[in-house]
Image (spheres, rainbow, N blue to C red):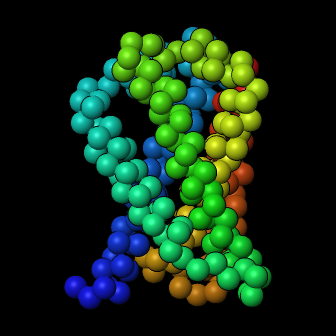
Amino acid sequence: MASSEKSFALRRLHSLLGVIPLGVFLIQHLVINHFAVNSPEAFNNASDFMWNLPFKIVLETLVIYLPILFHAVYGVYIAFTSKNNVTHYSTFRNWMFLLQRITGIIAFIFIAIHVWQTRVQAALGHHINYDMMADLFNSPINVIGYVIGIVSVIFHFSNGLWSFAVSWGITQSDRSQKIMAYVSLGAFLVITFIGLRALFAFM
């Protein structure tokens, strides 16, 4: 396979994994967290249900860890090798391209911290429940970091929906791409509302 064809295939795979399964997992994860809005018990029950799923390790490895590892590593490569030209062509799409790269780096750092503070701690014997999350958000620094991290991850996913639709030939005309831009904006607003509402429910 020629270098350009290989690059195109990798970028399409990178885009696909960002939507399926990672985008699906992001929404599912935020919805589980949103149970905290109802009550601590509702969140604990939802969290325990996910924690006790059969074949959890296999599912996590195939659906989360391997896809996110490829998406993150290749995404960092794209971020540091792509040429941003907003200083010469300050168009909306160029700015979205730049913000996609910036939020990708922020998301990479945030997810690593989040996994350490939750999944790794759970593996070390700490039970993930409402009290654990509430203690985490007793720190204003953690709250600010999570707000920035959550918004960055959601923006990266939502704006990535537009790129995914273009990369896979779903939106080829200018009109369809414009419609997809509004769809991406709507997804960003709705998912951000869910994510931040869940975050503040732990406070």
Q: Vertically, is 40 above or below 156? A: above
Check the image and report above or below for 38 versus 73.
above
Q: Residue at the location (44% across, 50% down)?
A: 22
Residue 49 shows up from this direction:
no
State which quadrant residue 84 falls in: bottom right
Residue 200, can we see it?
Answer: yes
Quadrant in which residue 179 is drawn: bottom right
At horizontal 40% and vertical 50% (from top left) the residue drawn is 68
x, y percentage for residue 79?
54, 67
For this view, does 94 lie left or right of residue 164? right
Residue 7 position, x and y percent, is 36, 79
Q: Residue at x 61, y 51 (%)?
A: 106
Q: How many marks?
A: 0
Which part of the image, by quadrant, shows the N terminus? bottom left
Side of 83 where 201 appears, left or right: right
**Measuring 68% from the left and 77% from the top, which residue is drawn there?**
93
* Furthest residue toward front: 80
Q: Name the side, left or right, on which 136 lies relative to 79.
A: right
Q: Residue 137 or 200: which is nearer the viewer?
A: 137
Q: Position of residue 142 (x, y in %)?
A: 68, 29
Image spot of residue 116 (x, y percent): 47, 30
The quadrant of the image that shows the C terminus is top right
